């Protein structure tokens, strides 16, 4: 008896017409989830075309797919970022440890973290929801597509890149996020004084980034600045080493 649900008729009820038709349980309406606790459908397809897909389907297909991603993302950002004009941005936020902690400690800043990998973004979003962080949004997006989708008014005030994939093999170095074109992309959405904080365990990627920043006309390296906010990330925990760089967007 104790385990019977209310929708099952009890023994002996069969004598009345009412008991023949069990009353289905009234569905409990669920409150609509807050914006950034779910991955809405457009985000699911927002992944970079894999090189092998491009090889099979061709460059036109890859370009069209990318254009579609950017268009959908632009629409989403209109709502998700609303009127925010100074964004603290984490590129490749992984499981969201760092940005969730940063956002909690800086309620006056509006923080956006993006990552390519769905389950990492979902974990990040759970941290946002648990912490009730109304100033933090996590999204699944590819970084160059996200930057291309930003509206001209949506500016990056601070940029954080923590433990980006180091691509240690020489033939893979072209995959590193830091290159002249992406430093230009970041500069396009920054304002004079925007800070770019870069942390890696990899000596090779540290040197590579230092060289690219030093050679770039729109970023200036700042030596010896302390890392602005410490919270161990998932990858930092594995790698341990910290090599930091700071650059400021020039006027
Ligand atoms: C080595 S992990 C570091 C994650 C996190 N920052 C940390 O320290 O734990 C690099 C992350 O960058 C993400 N990533 C790589 N390329 C990306 C891109 N083009 N756009 C968005 N995220 C990217 C990966 O999915 C991965 O989660």
Image: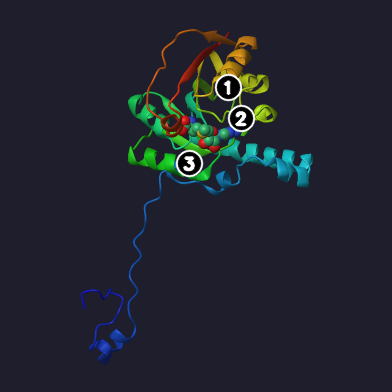
Question: Up-down: is 214 above or below 127?
Answer: above
Q: Give the secondary structure at mark 2.
A: loop
Of the numbered discs in the image, which one, if any, rests on residue 120?
A: 3
Q: Residues within 10 Å of mark 3 (few under 14, many from 20)?
A: many
Of mark 3 and mark 1, the one earlier in the sequence is 3
Mark nearest the camera among 3 and 2 is 2
In the image, taking residue 150 as reference, residue 26 lies left or right, namely left
The extreme bottom residue here reads: 15
Q: Considering depth in this image, is 43 or 181 the residue closer to the camera? A: 181
Q: Considering depth in this image, is 152 or 44 the residue closer to the camera? A: 44
Q: Position of residue 179 (x, y in %)?
A: 65, 21
Disc 1 target residue: 205
Q: Give the secondary structure at mark 1.
A: helix
Q: Position of residue 46 (x, y in %)?
A: 60, 42
Q: Distance between the residues labelled 2 and 1?
A: 8 Å
Q: In which quarter of the image is the N terminus?
A: bottom left
Of the numbered discs in the image, which one, if any, rests on residue 13?
A: none
Of the numbered discs in the image, which one, if any, rests on residue 167?
A: 2
Q: Residue at x 62, y 11 (%)?
A: 218
Of mark 3 and mark 2, the one earlier in the sequence is 3
Q: Where is residue 225 in the image (x, y as percent from the top left)?
A: 44, 10
In the image, taking residue 13 as reference, residue 95 lies left or right, namely right
Answer yes or no: disc 3 within 8 Å of ligand 1: yes
Question: Up-down: is 232 above or below 47?
Answer: above
Answer yes or no: disc 2 within 8 Å of ligand 1: no
Q: Where is residue 84 in the image (x, y as percent from the top left)?
A: 48, 27
Q: Are marks 2 and 1 in contact (CB under 8 Å)?
A: yes
Q: Which residue is drawn at 70% across and 42% down?
A: 65
Answer yes or no: disc 1 within 8 Å of ligand 1: no
């Amino acid at each position: 008896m104790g385990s019977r649900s209310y929708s099952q008729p009890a023994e002996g009820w069969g004598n009345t017409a009412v008991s023949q038709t069990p009353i289905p349980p009234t569905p409990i309406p669920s409150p609509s989830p807050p914006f950034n606790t779910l991955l809405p459908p457009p985000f699911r397809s927002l992944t970079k075309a894999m090189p092998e897909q491009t090889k099979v389907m061709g460059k036109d297909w890859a370009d069209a797919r990318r254009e579609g991603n950017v268009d959908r993302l632009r629409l989403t950002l209109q709502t998700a970022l609303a009127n925010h004009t100074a964004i603290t941005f984490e590129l490749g936020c992984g499981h969201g440890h760092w940005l969730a902690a940063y956002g909690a400690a800086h309620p006056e800043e509006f923080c956006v973290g993006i990552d390519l990998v769905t389950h990492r973004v979902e974990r990040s979003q759970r941290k946002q929801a648990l912490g009730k962080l109304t100033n933090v949004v996590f999204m699944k997006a590819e970084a160059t597509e996200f930057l291309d989708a930003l509206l001209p008014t949506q500016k990056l005030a601070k940029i954080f890149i923590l433990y980006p994939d180091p691509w240690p093999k020489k033939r893979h170095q072209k995959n590193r996020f830091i290159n002249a074109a992406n430093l230009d992309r970041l500069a396009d959405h920054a304002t004079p004084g925007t800070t770019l904080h870069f942390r890696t365990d990899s000596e090779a990627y540290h040197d590579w980034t230092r060289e690219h920043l030093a050679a770039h006309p729109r970023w200036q390296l700042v030596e010896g600045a302390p890392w602005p906010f410490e919270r161990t990330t998932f990858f930092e925990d594995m790698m341990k080493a910290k090599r930091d760089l700071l650059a400021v967007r020039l006027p």
